[in-house]
Amino acid sequence: MAFDAPGAAASGWEADGSTLGAALRAGLLEPIPVPSDRPVPPLSALPATAAQAAQDRYLENLERPVARNASAAWEEGELAQWRALWRDAPVAGWGYVVEPDGVRRVVFPWPAERDDELVRLCQATVERRAGRATVSTVGATRQINVGPDLPALAVRRTGGYVWIGTSARDLERVAAPRPAGDVVRWARADLRALRGEAGRWEKAEGPAAPEQTRPLSDRVLGLLGWIPNTTSISVERKRTSGGWSETLVFGTR
């Protein structure tokens, strides 16, 4: 499938639908470096005030590290329902758009009768991270709000597809993807926009160290350093009678 994303820093279509869940979670639902598989802390009874006089369990000792085996009691929360959803309604592929200002959008084919279930799980994840969340309707978009009506996530249907972004405003001009003939996978990246993120990547990942690999700063920026005159990359994979062919185009100044 293909769609227009003029001016995007990166856009593409992935043919492997099994990667959608992880991408949606890391890109929009929980945009943190390493989302936990068990993000819900365990609940335990409050200590008795008399019996625990010698051990104050209401305070944390910052000089004593938390025991690693304590994390085994943490729970999956709504993540188990997400896995069941993707298992019961697998998608054939999905697309993404990343704007130069960091705005992200994801699109994938989705049955209309399961829209409510999708929005409900999105709301559950938002509530786990930000507290009470409400769903409002903004035009053709359902927006999940937290706090004083701050947008956290938005879902909009276009034909047989669903777009997910951070707010209804980000989804105002989206359209349903269209068939792209024999193309099964494609991607486009504006390398000038990626180079513009260099300072943020290095700040987030820290200074270089021999014993540490920084995925973005060391790999992506290192690669871009070898192709300083290249401003864009486009990839297209097409189905052929003998399998598939792939075309890689480097754009220059």
Image (cartoon, rainbow, N blue to C red):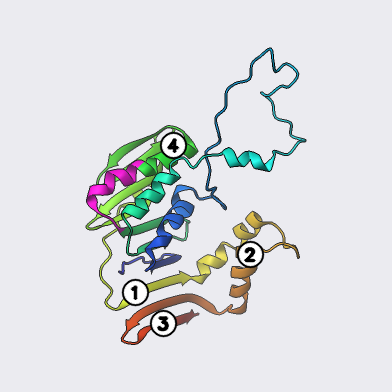
Along the line of sight, the residue nearer the viewer: 199 or 65: 65
**Span shown in magenta:** 109-120
Q: Residue furthest bottom?
A: 242
Which one is earlier in the sequence, the residue at label 3 or at label 1?
1
Report helix, strand or loop for mark 1: strand
Category of crowding for the residue at label 2, using alpha-carbon neighbours closer than 10 angstroms: few (below 14), some (14–19), many (at least 20): many
What's the residue at 25%, 71% (across, down)?
A: 179
**Do tag 2 and tag 4 residues touch (Cβ < 8 Å)?**
no
State how far apart marks 4 and 1 are (Cα): 36 Å
Task: Give amino acid for label 2.
Answer: Ser
Q: Is residue 123 above or below residue 176?
A: above
Magenta stretch encompasses residue 154: no
Circle 1 is placed at which residue position?
A: 184
Label 2: which secondary element: helix
- Identified by mark 3, the residue type is Glu
Residue position for label 2: 217
The secondary structure type at the circle numbered 3 is strand
For residue 207, which quarter of the picture?
bottom right
Q: Determine whether the residue tagged by mark 4 lies in a helix, strand or loop.
A: helix
Q: CA distance from mark 4 to mark 3?
A: 42 Å
